[in-house]
Image (spheres, helix red, strand yellow):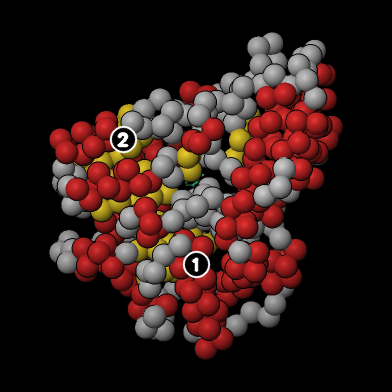
Amino acid sequence: MVAPRVYAALSQPIVGHLDPYFFQITEEVRALLGYVFSTQNQFNMALSGTGSSGMEAAVANFAEPGQKFALLANGYFAERIGEMARRQGADVVRLEQQWGRPFDPQNVRDFLRRERPRIVAFVQAETSTGLFNHAKHICEAAHEVDALVIADCVTSLGGMPVLVDENGIDIAYSCTQKGLGCPPGLAPVTVSERALEYRRARTTPVPSWYLDLLLLDTYFEGRRYHHTASATMFYALREGLAIIAEEGLEARWERHRRNHLAFVAGVEAIGLEMLVTNPADRLWTLNTPRIPAGVDEAKLRQYLLEQRGIEIAGGFGPLAGTVLRIGTMGYGSTAENVLMILHELESALAQQGYRAAGNAQAAAEKVLATPV
Ligand SMILES: Cc1ncc(COP(=O)(O)O)c(C=O)c1O
């Protein structure tokens, strides 16, 4: 959901892409991105494109033909990173884990010691499964073999602790349409000094002109024309980030955590199980309850959409038909929304003859009533 203040920002008069006012906005965005990524990095920018453009920029600037690129693959979006790296000509080596299951730190360490890649990529918040891949052990193992770490933070930024510096992430990217509460259209990116040095030393040209981060820097920092960025999208992003700064990053995480916990308590009370078994590995922004036996997932979602005007997502790939994917992110992460979706879910399940084991509302309200 888009915050009302962001809708208002979208209607402001448009200035040119080289206007001093535009650069004032991009400078504010740069500083605020440092705050939401929890980093001292100075190289923070928003690329003109959706989250996938952030992914493509990260891969195109740091993967090189013939060099080892280690992929920690446990979901759909990790596969997309791997495909991009393959197209850049990198030698992609994979550590596989079942969708929805976390990586064992020792396996990661052994894999990276064995492969000694230049780049390690993983998805911090895997939207296809609802799993949070903990960054710290991955970054430590990668740095031990002197590799750079790319982290996909598309579904974590603004909703969960991304902690770029504390975790040691070298390159992180995200989107605007999830935890930041903006429309889709820009891809926030942050790059560490160490990764920048690596990038500056690169001798083969970055195959993508549009997403070459050093060329983009001549625009945002050098203030010379590179492409015609949309002032409107930057107004929206600045507003979304300002709202986060006003709420406070930690208070925002706590809001997401609490609403997620209330949702989980509610679905568990009616007898559903979560795909991600360990509560510490679950996303606070996106919840994946399993579909109980005898319930048709497609029919359930169709009922919610057509009868109740509520759109939720289903599983896909190996999880097709087996889970629901319900977002509790950004402006949409509220106690009211959690209670509403639990109520509607209960009636959608009942419509298919499912008998709830207990009271979802009472279980969720108990969590919501606990003092912070
Ligand atoms: C984890 C993850 N990475 C990348 C993307 C791609 O982002 P976009 O669809 O904004 O291009 C998504 C989209 O949902 C995502 O969830």
* Vertical arrangement, residue 312 with respect to residue 198, above or below: above
Label 1 SS: helix
Q: Amino acid at mark 1?
A: Tyr
Residue 89: in sight, yes or no?
A: no
Residue 30 in the image: state x and y as whole percent.
47, 73
Q: Is residue 330 left or right of residue 344?
A: left
Q: Residue at x 69, y 11 (%)?
A: 294
The label number, if any, that marks residue 35 in the structure image: 1
Q: Is residue 225 visible?
A: yes
Residue at 21% across, 39% down = 112
Q: Position of residue 236 (x, y in %)?
A: 63, 68
Q: Which residue is mark 2?
A: 105
| Residue shown at 32% from the left, 43% from the top | 137
Q: Compared with residue 161, is residue 363 higher up or lower down, i.e. above or below?
A: above
Task: Identify the image quadrant of residue 248.
Answer: bottom right
Label pair 2/1, CB-CB below 8 angstroms: no
Disc 1 Cβ-to-ligand 1 distance below 8 Å: no
Residue 91, x across and y down, in percent:
20, 41
In the rendering, at what x and y percent does residue 257 appear? Answer: 61, 45
Tell me if 23 is positioned left or right of 97 in this view.
right
Locate residue 49 relative to residue 134 in the image: left or right.
right
Mark 2 beta carbon near ligand 1 (under 8 Å): no
Helix, strand or loop at mark 2: helix
Q: Earlier in the sequence, mark 2 or mark 1?
A: 1
Pick the front one: 262 or 241: 262
